[in-house]
Amino acid sequence: MANAEHGGRTADALGATAVGAVQARVRVARLGLWLVAAILAVRQVAVVLSTPRGERLTDLETWVGPDGVLHVKGSLYDSTQFTGTPFGGLVLKPLTRAAEQALGWGWTFGTLLLVVALGLIAARALPQPVSRRTSLLAAPVAISLLMLSLPVRNTLYLGQTSIMPVLLVLLGCFAVRGERTSGVLIGVAAALQPTLLLFTPLLWFTGRRRAALSTGATFAACTLLAWAAMPGDSYTYWVHHMAGVGLGGRADDLANQSLHGALLRFGLTGPLEIALFLLLGAAVAVLALRRAVRYAHDGQLLLAVAVTGCAAIVVSPTAWQHQLLWVLLAVVGQVGRRTSDRYVWPVAIILVMTLPARMMVPDKVILHPLRADLVLLAAVVTAAVVPFLSRTSPYWQTPVPTRYADKVPSRFRHIPLVPFLRRVVSRPNLLFELLLIRVTYYAYAQIRLAAAGGSNSAGRVTAEEHGEEIHSVERALHIDIEYWANHAVVKVDWLRSFFDFYYESFHFGVPLAILAVLYWRRPTDYRWARTAIGFATVFALIGFWLYPLAPPRLMPGLGFIDTVHGVQDFSQPDYGTLTELTNQYAAMPSLHFGWSLWCGIVIVMLAPRWWMKALGLLHPLFTVTAIVVTGNHWVLDAVGGAAVVGAGFGVTYLFQGPRAKVVTAQAEKVSSDSPAPVRDRTPS
């Protein structure tokens, strides 16, 4: 008994030690996250206050500054600079007596406090159950995301009021007691932003009918108060401008992310546009409210609020960037049955709400509608499309686990990153992969441009000096075949046209096609191949940065013919350094050849037929010929491209070991024999 008692105490002590260690790590993590939130807050304030006067808080100055709209006799809407409701103007009127400098500081720090309050309330409103660790870390994470979001940054910079309606709604739904008080807060928010009246039916159909009536009564009282104090302005806003339509900037401006703005950008005008706007807006609002009511009954009231707020964005005549904060709240929704899918939706929302659309969507004509309406699309899919999981779903707490390939020998067990590079057997999430490819490509394009050395003659001189060096080395090695090949192909029209077409058309298409096939047919090999080309591209970017190089076609005096771009004017001092799309001196190493070689290696290693392998080798052969005969690369550029691809595969091998094998037959059998999960009852 003594031994048993002694052993029990030891186990208890070990358990207590383990729990204490976990709690200590959570405290450290929480402190670190609060430090990050504080740094972001300080940075945002510093950005605003360091901006020269006259360029910061411009909307606030337009309203309440010495010559602002609220000082001028006549209508608030004569200049179309004030876009708020008459009640909003009435609330802001007392601020016109504040000193300009004190108002700027007070407004900035006051907005900052509102953001902190918004993050704290959102963290407390997470759908239950949540772990203690999540509850402790949620507040600093929420505040940090808000600080990083484009709406908050825009609000702080312009001096806008758009955080207040969101905060009032969250206070009314989560912080105050009593339905009447809740309705009063939401009613005031609607008086500041009328489309928030959509929360009235949400309150009504979720059983909070006193709150719904109080919301409507408060909105009416605030609006009538403003009408009594400013009848002319109220008539202008509610009747002449039909609840603010046409105020502010042009409704078809890219900054207007409402459905009305999108239809105008598509070229629709007049009665047809109005009819479509009303019809589609009503459909989105009805569908969003039905979904929001279901999520509210499911215990996900914060998600219901986000869905309703996104519907308000869609149906609003104008939804400027600082009014789009509702989309960020949708990050609390859970999407996907698999463990590997759970992070896709929050990552997508965070990227959309923290990065400009030009970073998310390539600048291609076919993608311009998506690029122009990315946040609107996020609001629409949040309101009406995304199948968020119900808390009653069996996948809510226990998603389908990720299956991993057979273990392979690990080379660097002491490197903390290595355990996260395990290759899973299940297909990776498509949305996450597309986001990863897009953000990586944007970084690649920006680094290529930055590596140009500036669009000045100094960058050109350096690149041409490096071109002379490469040319000299090739002459010494007797591989300077560029001039001969270039002029030989120019003499044969069909051959010149073929290689020009090959150079321009297959650089991106073939690698993306191979990745698509691997994603669909060989998910394990997809991860291996994607990692290898990623490392190769990173190494190539280092080369662009360290060694800007003029290609043969941009070397004056050597007599090369630019078959793709035509005759060049070398008398222009800045020519070649930059174009609209790329850095012309990012030639060493050649990613044209590097990516094509990656394609050939992947096809040779994975293709099941010998003739497929042979066709795969033709692509790098045609590519290296095209880059040389068109005058776009030196032969040594291709050698550099081969080197970075080899390094990419090598680093992938070092981190991940040999290429993952197919899952064993026993694992497949276990998976096929496992019982099917209970049907998911997810509200739509």
Image: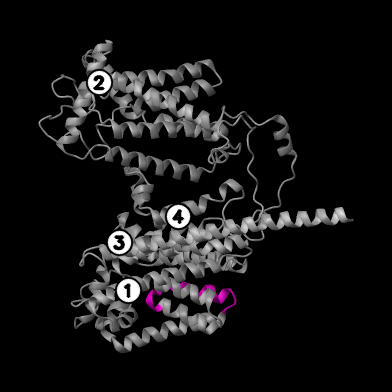
- Residue 338 lies, with reference to residue 115, above or below; the image says above
* Residue on which the image places disc 2: 470
- Image quadrant containing the C terminus: bottom right
| Secondary structure under the numbered disc 4 in the rendered image | helix
Viewer-nearest of discs 3 and 4: 3
* Residue on which the image places disc 1: 107
Res 321 seen here: no
Q: Marks 2 and 1, Cα distance to the nearest angstrom?
A: 59 Å
**Circle nearer the N terminus (2, 3):** 3
Q: Amino acid at mark 2?
A: Ile
Q: Marks 2 and 4, Cα distance to the nearest angstrom?
A: 45 Å
Highlighted magenta segment, given as a residue range: 191-208
Q: Amino acid at mark 4?
A: Ile
Residue drawn 24% across the image and 40% down it: 580
**Circle nearer the N terminus (2, 1):** 1
| Secondary structure under the numbered disc 3 in the rendered image | helix
Observer-nearest of 505 and 52: 52
Q: Which mark is residue 486?
A: none
Q: Amino acid at mark 1?
A: Trp
| Secondary structure under the numbered disc 2 in the rendered image | helix
**Circle nearer the N terminus (3, 1):** 3
Question: How many marks can you see?
Answer: 4
Q: Marks 3 and 1, Cα distance to the nearest angstrom?
A: 14 Å
Q: Which mark is residue 350?
A: 4
- In the rendered view, does 507 fall on the left or right side of 208? left
**Secondary structure mainly formed by the magenta segment:** helix
- Residue 511 lies, with reference to residue 145, above or below; the image says above
Indicate whether residue 339 is drawn in magenta: no
Q: Are marks 3 and 1 in contact (CB under 8 Å)?
A: no
| Secondary structure under the numbered disc 1 in the rendered image | helix
Q: Which mark is residue 47?
A: 3
